[in-house]
Image (cartoon, rainbow, N blue to C red):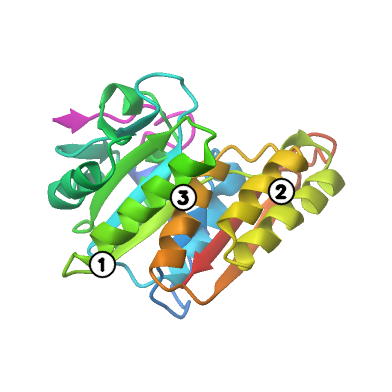
């Protein structure tokens, strides 16, 4: 099965040459690499969030496999959807799915179901791929989307990911795809996003969940990030660090209605 790009020409250029050029402008070739249990990476149009995504992907040592977990914006498919076979295509290449890791996650967690329909038009994972493909055409992926707001679901998914990673004899890193605050002023975005970032830095999945709810932070990937933090906790994470934060206002010049973007490393 080949998953065709859904947002090429919208979120990023459909021309391979133009996409390669854009990604090259956002990555750092001189960045010191470090192994990561997980990262947080944004998923807006590359012109807005590419500098943040490029910064975080530039800093990590690439594993054998990335588990990509992001929000389901389309409402299509099951609440927690995974693809366990095939390849995902983007203009600059193809990335194959790691069937063993995907099947193992399904076996460990009954709420994770096979559903390619949920992924057909969703952009939150696809927008990660140009950065991954820039650094490696051999790395495998496991795509998972969530449209649940249950803390227990995050705990179950995170626990399953951790158990599978522990039992895999090659490196696996979790990419939690999320933008931060949506369509608030730059100052409000920075204040609210700072509270969420503090909970991620504290490796506190429950705290992130509660903070996003209580502060009404429009962080679209809060549940995927929470699930990643539960996995990181179980995998013995000791540190989470902000690599880069910015808002769309820094690109558009409109500071009244911005979206926030955070790139973070958990290790």
Q: CA distance from mark 2 to mark 3?
A: 15 Å
Q: Residue furthest bottom?
A: 32
Task: Locate residue 48, reporting x and y percent.
Answer: 61, 44
Name the residue: 40% across, 27% down: 79
Q: Nearer the viewer, residue 109 or 113?
A: 109
Quarter of the picture containing the N terminus is top left
User: Which residue is the site of mark 2?
Assistant: 211
Mark 3 falls on what kind of element? helix
Establish if 63 lies above or below 178.
below
Task: Locate residue 114, reporting x and y percent.
Answer: 23, 30
Name the residue: 49% across, 34% down: 11
Binning the other alpha carbons within 10 Å of mark 2 as few (below 14), some (14 to 19) or many (20 upward) gives some
Name the residue: 54% across, 47% down: 42
User: Which residue is the site of mark 1?
Assistant: 166
Q: CA distance from mark 3 to mark 1?
A: 16 Å
Q: Looking at the image, tell me whether mark 2 or mark 3 is earlier in sequence order.
A: 2
Answer yes or no: is residue 57 visible: no
Q: Main secondary structure of the magenta part?
A: loop
Q: On residue 177, which mark appears?
A: none
Q: On residue 227, which mark appears?
A: 3
Mark 2 falls on what kind of element? helix
Q: Looking at the image, tell me whether mark 2 or mark 1 is earlier in sequence order.
A: 1
Residue 62 within the magenta-colored segment of the rendering? no
Q: CA distance from mark 2 to mark 1?
A: 29 Å
Specify whether 204 is left or right of 12: right
Answer yes or no: is residue 115 visible: yes
Magenta residues span 1-15
Q: Nearer the viewer, residue 104 or 175?
A: 104
Q: Nearer the viewer, residue 25 or 136?
A: 136
């Amino acid at each position: 099965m080949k998953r065709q790009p859904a947002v090429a020409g919208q979120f990023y250029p459909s021309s391979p040459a133009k996409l390669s050029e854009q990604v090259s402008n956002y990555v750092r070739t001189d960045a010191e690499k470090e192994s990561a249990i997980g990262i947080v990476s944004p998923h807006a149009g590359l012109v807005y969030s590419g500098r943040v995504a490029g910064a975080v992907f530039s800093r990590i040592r690439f594993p054998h496999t990335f588990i990509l977990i992001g929000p389901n914006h389309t409402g299509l498919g099951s609440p927690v959807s995974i693809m366990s076979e095939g390849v995902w295509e983007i203009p600059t290449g193809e990335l194959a799915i790691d069937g063993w890791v995907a099947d193992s996650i399904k076996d460990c967690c009954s709420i994770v179901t096979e559903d390619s329909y949920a992924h057909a038009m969703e952009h939150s994972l696809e927008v990660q791929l140009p950065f991954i493909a820039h650094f490696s055409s051999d790395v495998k992926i496991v795509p998972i989307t969530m449209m649940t707001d249950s803390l227990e679901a995050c705990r179950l998914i995170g626990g399953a990911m951790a158990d599978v990673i522990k039992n895999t004899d090659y490196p696996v890193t979790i990419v939690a795809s999320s933008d931060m605050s949506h369509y608030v002023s730059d100052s409000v975005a920075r204040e609210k996003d700072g509270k969420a970032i503090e909970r991620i830095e504290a490796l506190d999945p429950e705290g992130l969940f509660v903070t996003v709810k209580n502060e009404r932070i429009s962080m679209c990937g809060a549940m995927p990030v929470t699930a990643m933090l539960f996995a990181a906790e179980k995998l013995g994470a000791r540190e989470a660090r902000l690599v880069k934060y910015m808002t769309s206002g820094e690109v558009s010049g409109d500071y009244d209605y911005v979206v926030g973007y955070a790139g973070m490393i958990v290790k």
